[in-house]
Image (cartoon, rainbow, N blue to C red):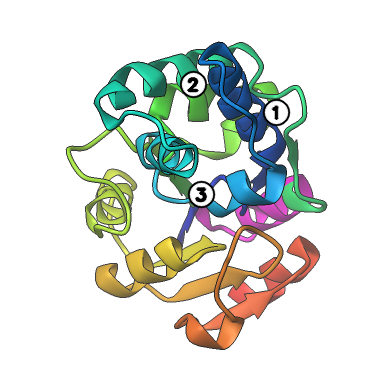
Amino acid sequence: MILIFDLDGTLIDSAPDIHAAANRMLAGEGVEPLDLPTITSFIGNGLPKLVERVMAARGMDPARHKALTQITLDHYNADATTLTRPYPGVPQALQALEAAGHRLALCTNKPEAPARAVLADLGLAGHFPVIVGGDTLAVNKPDPAPALACVEAMGGGAAAYVGDSEVDAETAQRAGLPFYLFTEGYRKSPVAALPHKAVFADFADLPALIG
C-alpha cells in the first residue's frame, strides 16, 4: 500500500522552530511576539496562511504579507531544525512499514524545499521518494490534488493518508483515502469531529494498525 504522510504535527514537532521564525519576523517589524500555543494554532494551511494569521493577530498591514512571508521563510530556513524533532517512534515506524512492503510518500503544506531540507537534517529523507510540498502544485491541502499527485507519482494503487489535523482529514476525505489520525499533533477539534479509519497516539502502534 502507498502510505502518504503529513509532515508538521505528524512526523515532526516543528512548532518551536516555526514559532521562533515568526517571532523573529515580528521583532524585525518592532512588533510584540506571540506565544507558542498561538503560533501552533496557526499551523496547517501552509506558511503564507500562517503569516497572514500572525499579521492579523498583531494588526499589521496586509499589504506587506508577501514580503513578511519571505522574511519568515528566510528565518525558518536558517534554523529549521534547531528545536524540531521527530515524534517518538517515527523512524522505527517508517522502517517497519517499509519492511512490511508499504511505499511511503510525503504530502505537506510546508514549501517543498524546506520540507526536503528538514527531512534530510533529521535523517528521514530516504524514506520518501516522493514529496509534494505546499508550493509543488498550484493548489495545496485540503485540495485533494497534492495527495492524489503522490499516489500517481508512486505508480498508483491502494493508498491511505496519515496526518494530525482538520486539514489532513479533509484532504483524505476529498481524495477518497482512508485516514489514520495521529492524536498528538496540532489538531484543534475533538477526535470524534474528524472522519478517520483509525486513531493512534504512539507511532509504535501504526504498523499494526495499517496491517
Q: Distance between the residues labelled 1 and 2?
A: 24 Å
- Helix, strand or loop for disc 2: helix
Numbered label attached to residue 98: none
Could you say which is closer to the camera, residue 147 or residue 130?
147
Residue 60 x, y percent position in the rendering: 40, 31
Tag in front: 3 or 1? 3
Q: Is mark 1 on a helix, strand or loop?
A: loop
Quarter holding the N terminus is bottom left
Q: Earlier in the sequence, mark 2 or mark 3?
A: 3
**Structural distance between the alpha carbons of marks 2 and 3:** 14 Å
Residue 204 position within the rendered picture, expressed as x and y whole percent measured from the top left = 79, 64
Q: Give the range drawn in magenta.
A: 91-103
Can the viewer see residue 76?
Answer: no
| Residue 123: mark in rendering | 1
Q: Mark 2 points at which residue?
A: 72
Q: Nearer the viewer, residue 28 or 94?
A: 28
> Of label 3 and label 1, which has the lower sequence position?
3
Indicate left or right for 99 with 164 as reference: right
Residue 112, by quadrant, is top left
Predominant SS along the magenta part = helix
Q: Which amino acid does label 1 sit on?
A: Gly
Residue 42 badge = 3
In the image, farthest residue toward the bottom:
192
88 sits to left or right of 27: right
